[in-house]
Amino acid sequence: MVGTAIARALSRYDLAVVLADAANDVGTGTTKANTAILHTGFDAVPGSLESRLLRRGHALLAGYAAQAGIPVERTGALLIAWTPEQLQALPEITDKARHNGYASIRAVPAAELYRREPHLGPGALAALEIPDESIVCPWTTPLAFATEAVRGGVRLRLDCRVTGAQPEAAQTGAHLIRTTRGTLRSRWLVNAAGLGADRIDAMLGGGGFTVRPRRGELIVFDKLARPLVGSILLPVPTAQTKGVLVAPTVYGNVLLGPTAEEVEDRSDTATTAAGLAALLEAGRTIVPDLVREQVTATYAGLRAATEHRDYQIRVDAGLRYACVAGIRSTGLSASLGIAEYVVDQMAGAGLPLKERDGVAGPPAMPYIGQAGVRPYQDAGRIAADPDYGRIVCHCERVTRGEIRDALASTVPPADTDGLRRRTRAMNGRCQGFYCAATVSAMMTEPAMADGPGRPA
């Protein structure tokens, strides 16, 4: 998320930029496995860089999403106190929000809370309303950033894992970056490697932080559960975690999670019996009827936490190096604020920025949310192209036209997982049981693969 946002920002200038990703697609890893909430930053540590960039990022992404067609729904959030101790913490949270520049927070008594959320479990004492918290599509967002970047001239290198870096080689005056796809040479290097950021930083002589992966497991409930929840339902946070929440998604489902568990393995995104049981137990308290609904999927993501509470962002002018690390779980909301800040810092450190002619702006992305009009609902679009009326994935109402468009897009999917994130195909209650074979066959059809292909 953060790397594509920075690449997008740099693509607006007269620069030669390469975006290297170890995965076979953008938007994998931590980016694809989060709670998909566009945060206001009301509960960030006042005065922190995270607080500042969250506030800025929320404003920028809300505007960008509207231009690019990224699904966003302003549901608002309710932060609920269930115990006397949590109730006593609400004034401090309100004060923190106001110090963070968010003044719209307000107290909600129990009677009003239950009028607004009639399926809430018994025992809630009061809540705080944060009306500007929203739900957002975490898949379309980095794809939009990457699409704009590539159209602006950024060279996207996928399956390109960094294996070593030699700063400022004497013979070239540039960084030599060894990758699984050859050596890259660059005057400047931006490290937005997420879970691997400390390892890249160590190659450049860093050492000020260590990534400590924090696993969060989540449960996705069927669309029939959506009427049970009107707002994002937040817990009172602790020093260790923001706790388990219940939230609608822009796809029409309901999320329950996440857990928070320190793990050693930076690839350990397995769900566990203990983790899912703990989530269901929490769900019985928050919305008892929810746990009786069908589960569509479970997943886990790894937050790139460090030993520090704040973002680890620094720009070294002498080394011509920007480190963007420790973003944890707020990278989606803060992404455009982080990108703006990092590029400004690089400019101050000597990176010449001359705005490029003909900057096109945000791309028009395929809409995969539930609240707007999808292709199968658009009679005019179907009349112009019948493939938009030919449904392939019946659970998610994904059409042949949408799959064709995804395969021919600026940043096409490499596999069916990538196609899921672009179209929602195979993400429904059957999880691809009925449509996976058809979808896989379509990905190999010559007519479907005649798009621009994978970026070199």
Image (spheres, rainbow, N blue to C red):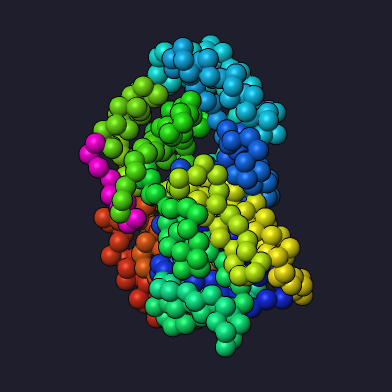
Vertical order, 35 against 128 (above or below):
below
Q: Residue at x 60, y 57 (%)?
A: 314
How many numbered callouts?
A: 0
- Magenta segment: does it hold 273? yes
* Residue 298, quarter of the rendered image: top left
Q: Outermost residue, bottom direction?
A: 171
Q: At which x and y percent is residue 72?
A: 58, 45
Q: At which x and y percent is residue 210?
A: 43, 53
Q: Which residues are magenta?
A: 266-274
Vertical order, 68 against 109 (above or below):
below
- Observer-nearest residue: 155 or 227? 155
Magenta span dominant secondary structure: loop
**Could one spot residue 215 in this view of the protein?**
yes
Vertical order, 453 against 123 (above or below):
below
Q: Residue at x 59, y 22 (%)?
A: 92
Please state if 82 lies on the left or on the right of 37 as rendered: left
Q: Outermost residue, left direction?
A: 273
Q: Residue at x 55, y 44 (%)?
A: 310
